[in-house]
Image (tube, rainbow, N blue to C red):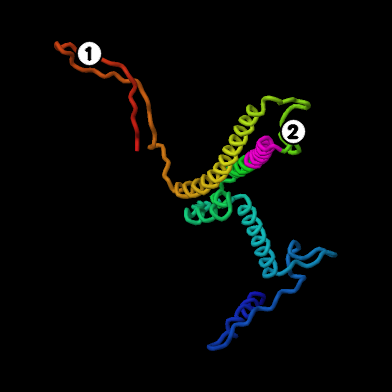
Amino acid sequence: MKAGVFEEASALPVLAIGPGAAPRRPAAAPADSLPPEAQPAPGQPSRPDSQSADTVAADTVALRLQQLGDSVDSAVKLPAQPKTRFVPNPKRALWLSLVVPGAGQIYNRKYWKLPIIYGGFLGCTYAFMWNQQMYRDYSQAYLDIMDDDPRTDSYLDMLPPRYDISGREEQFKNIFKRKKDFYRRYRDLSAFCFVGVYLLSVIDAYVDAQLSEFDITTDLSMRVHPSVIGGNGTFGQRTAAYGLGCSLNF
């Protein structure tokens, strides 16, 4: 009798499935029929379903992968891009130097030349002003000693205190004239030096910009080494001369 009942119960699901009919899931077994290890313990929450557990696991893996990628990006530094080499324009450097002295050197980024240029301008300016002042003083002293007016005696300021030149006026006239000409010549020379510094600053800015693309490699070199120069003598004897040889590589 027990065997027959088991066969009928097992055949029910098979008979229920017909052509075009959806299979029905067997009814879940009651909680009492579960094995002891599958039943949740009293006081503990029930286990989450498989779909929510897979979602949490996938989110955890994605978060860890993102953190790992961020750490790799921070550890690995990209190579720095090479900077573009600045090549100045010679004509622009020329015109800048003509308008403002030293502006061509600033444009060429040769700032260390500015103290030299402006130092030359200041030196020439000081020399010009000092020679100009001395020329005026000696010119006025020469004019005063040449006239016959006793009230014009500015030449005495050029002499030591209480210095008497009586009877030596002609000698001091020649001295004052030479001093006047001396300071006038150096005043003019100071002005020419000022113009020379200005022209040198212009030429330097132009040449420096023009040679900025000049190729300087290890092949451009000069080597000096000792050498022996030999030759045949008058009677077939071989003579030798010692000297220095110079080789140029282009």
Q: In front here: 62 or 106?
A: 106
**Quarter containing the C terminus:** top left
Closer to the chain start, of discs 2 and 1, is 2
Crowd around label 2: few <14 · some 14–19 · many ≥20 (10 Å):
few
Q: Is residue 78 left or right of residue 44?
A: left
Q: Compared to 19, does 153 lie above or below?
A: above
Q: In front here: 56 or 187?
A: 187
Coordinates of residue 89 in the picture (x, y in percent): 48, 55
Q: In front here: 232 or 131?
A: 131
SS class, disc 2: helix
Where does the magenta region start and end? 126-148
Query: Which residue ends up furthest to the right in the rendered image?
Result: 43
Give the main secondary structure of the magenta stretch: helix
Number of the front mark, 2 or 1: 2
Q: Is 143 contained in the magenta span?
A: yes
Coordinates of residue 80 in the picture (x, y in percent): 55, 51
Q: What residue is at 56 percent from the left and 48 percent from the top?
A: 105
Q: Which residue is mark 2?
A: 157
Crowd around label 1: few <14 · some 14–19 · many ≥20 (10 Å):
few
Query: Which residue ends up furthest to the bottom in the rendered image?
Result: 20
Q: Is residue 240 left or right of residue 146?
A: left
Q: Which residue is mark 1?
A: 239
Q: Is residue 155 left or right of residue 181?
A: right
Amino acid at the residue labelled 2: Asp
**Quarter containing the N terminus:** bottom right
Q: How many marks?
A: 2
Q: In front here: 184 or 227?
A: 184
Q: What residue is at 78 percent from the left and 65 percent from the top?
A: 40
